[in-house]
Amino acid sequence: MTYSNRLRASAMALGIVMAGTFGAAAQAKTLTISWWGYNGDKLNANIIEPFKKICGCDIVFETGNNADRLNKLKLRDGKGVDVIYLTDSFSQIGIAEGLFQKVDPAKLPNLADLYDIAKNPQGGYGPAYTIGRVGIVYDSAKVNPPITSWNDLWRADLKGAVTLPGITTTAGPMVVLQAGKNAKVDAFSDADKAFESIGKLKANVAKNYNTGSEMVNLVSTGEAKVAVTQDFTLASLKAAVPTMTWAQLSDGDIATLNTVNIPKGSENVELAYQFINFILSKEIQQIEAEQGVDAPVSTKVQLTPEQAKIWTYGADMISKLNRLDYVKLNQAKTDWIDRWNEIFSK
């Protein structure tokens, strides 16, 4: 079946199932979505236009980064948006500030087909619609022996060869957690020893980066041979340096989730449920994965090895991921930023 036919079939099937429940309520309404706005053309073709045909509604957007959009929602006391896309660290902040509604699983039948990690990642609030991972990438032509553990970042042969994510990025605080493990402590309860370990790691750091493009440039110019990064950067890294390799870590990669929530002030709650259930469907998850937009969380999605190689995909890989406690992480972050900056500003 062709791509366009699959979209039409998906829209028709979902429309038939949902029409009785949502059709009358959705007519002539406007769904307001807060998201990043990346891959706009594909998201419009794959999600927005097909959903508009199902719901008979208009859709408008609020775009921007996580922090800006969450802050706007807070200033409006949870109003003005019906669905909000956020990374899990920021959705945890929204939960702590009371900005979201808890979800009713009965209104999201496609939850049943998701990997467990995506169904209820934050205590009864919105599900994850895609999954990623943070790990280590290295130049296999220049780094020998291969990197097989987070502790390898401290190896003497990697002096001046590593680029780390800045502490205010998504992956930055994860380096602190791994530094704690390297020092055989919990970074949350013994930040002193964790940051002593960061101090020891500094000798191996060529430079910290704050954007993906900055990291790719460090690797492409040879300034760095090893990077701690998110998996969505792998394609760009390999395009710059074909021998860049995702490390197979014995102690596991770290899961990152993108979530969808319904703000407490949503004026179109039933329509929001309909939309979230739609993006969790096998059909939409399949198309998004095939087109390189998002990794699937639906267990029904089937990808070829070529399609899957850029994604965190499959039960085996997902079961090995480590999850973070973002409640503790968000509480610790201010102190960690100060400690990190003190080390790397010298």
Image (spheres, rainbow, N blue to C red):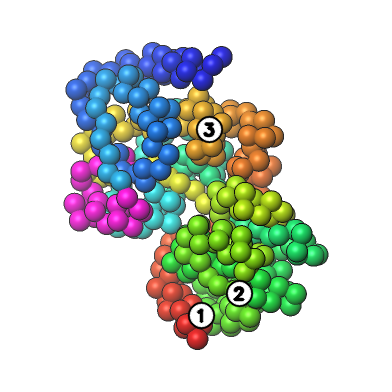
Circle 3 sits in a helix, a strand or a loop, which is it?
loop
Q: CA distance from mark 1 to mark 2?
A: 10 Å
Q: Which residue is mark 2?
A: 205
Q: Are marks 3 and 2 in contact (CB under 8 Å)?
A: no
Amino acid identity at mark 1: Phe
The verdict on residue 73 being magenta is yes
Q: Earlier in the sequence, mark 3 or mark 2?
A: 2
Q: Earlier in the sequence, mark 1 or mark 3?
A: 3
Q: Position of residue 335 (x, y in %)?
A: 42, 76
Q: Which residue is mark 3?
A: 291
Count up the numbered dots: 3
Q: Is any atom of residue 298 visible in this view? A: no
Q: Quadrant of the N terminus?
A: top right
Q: Which residues are magenta?
A: 64-84
- Mark 2 neighbour density, 10 Å: few (under 14) some (14–19) many (20 or more): many
Q: Which residue is mark 1?
A: 344
Query: Which residue lies at the image location 30% right of the left edge and 46% below the top edge?
Result: 63
Q: Is any atom of residue 235 visible in this view? A: yes
